[in-house]
Image (cartoon, grey):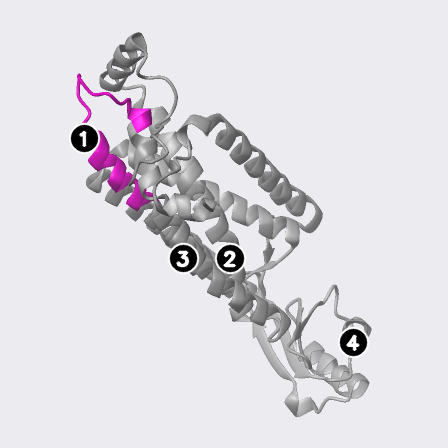
Amino acid sequence: MGLGRRLYRGEIDVDFVGRRKLWYGLSAFLIAFSIAGLVFSAVTHGSPLNLGVEFKGGSVFSFTAPKATIEQVRETMTDAGVHQPIVQQAGTAGWRVTTETLDEANLSRVQKSVSEDLGVDAKQISITSIGASWGGEVANKAWIGLGVFMLAIILYLSMAFEPKMALAAIVALIHDLVITAGIYAWSGFEVTPATMLGFLTILGYSLYDAVVVFDMIKEVTAKLGTTSKKTYTMAANDALNHTLIRSLNTSLVAILPVAAILFIGTTVLGAGTLKDLSLALFVGMLVGTYSSLCVATPLLVTLKEREPRYQAIAKRLASTGGGKGGAKRPATAKN
């Protein structure tokens, strides 16, 4: 019988909580790797992330040149006096070049160079300029939006569940953000407003998974008493396994279309909002699925095990030999 079928039948229990040291170690490595990427990017490029023109300001030239190559486009921009132009191919023939903020005279000079060197009608060259102050305002609003979102999560979880569950969920969300940001730092992918929308979306997605698991844990652990035959660890792990298939199915159903959109946005359409949004979603969903299973619940158990009530249950079961190991069930047990 295949592993997938056995999971669906409830014949396999994964000891997520019992392996918490493994998950903590893996998460610590991923976070350290991500922070190193952010620091390295800040030292070498002056910013932890490759912020798009919408955040730092600049000028964007968009045009169609079927016969041009990246080297030709970059050389044309450099010869026109542009410093370190960012050249991106949009589709099979389109180009998007981001530069520093240019005045009217320099904009006209670059437009003329592109027209003459690459054979593009000057009227077909789209030029967009964004001031640095406007970009800074967009960045500040994005941070404010993220802060309000996190505060709302803390308040909701604290009222719907309890403060320790809220803390575990927030740590998992920060864990997802740091790792996703680290991947962007190491890869050099551009961070745009669409990317920020993707970040907020993955936070909501990760939160959904954590809430589903915590709701089951709340229901199961509410029955624990002085005569209980399960420790908090065993009950929480059992609840996590009850929601495992739902979490995996939700993740798979969500990730597959996002992966398809990412592929189309990268290979067919090139640079654009679709690619920026789908990339953040794809990375974040993978990390969010991992954190909801291997970070949030083990951390919650670590916090709850310190409470006298659950320590007493664990000591009583340990003295009778019934509190060893994780939440193991017979191979024929059903969820």
Q: How far apart are marks 3 and 4 (CA)?
A: 35 Å
For marks 1 and 4 on the same chain, the one whose residue lies earlier in the sequence: 4
Mark nearest the camera among 3 and 1 is: 1
Q: Specify the farthest residue to the top.
A: 319
Give the class, few, some or many, for how many residues have Cα within 10 Å of label 2's Cα (few <14, many ≥20): many
Mark nearest the camera among 2 and 1 is: 1
Magenta range: 210-234
Quadrant placement of the N terminus:
top left
Secondary structure type for disc 2: helix
- Residue 251 picture location, percent across and down: 42, 53
Q: Distance between the residues labelled 2 and 1?
A: 36 Å
For marks 3 and 1 on the same chain, the one whose residue lies earlier in the sequence: 3
Any magenta on residue 34? no
Where is mark 2, residue-wise?
Answer: 282
Where is mark 1, residue-wise?
Answer: 222
Q: Do the numbered discs 2 and 1 sit on residues whose CB atoms are within 8 Å?
A: no
Where is mark 4, residue-wise?
Answer: 69
50 displayed left or right of 15: right
Mark nearest the camera among 2 and 3 is: 2
Q: In front here: 169 or 82?
A: 169
Q: How far apart are marks 2 and 3 (CA)?
A: 11 Å
Relative to 155, residue 303 above or below: above
Seen at 22% across and 38% down, the residue is: 161
Where is mark 3, residue-wise?
Answer: 201
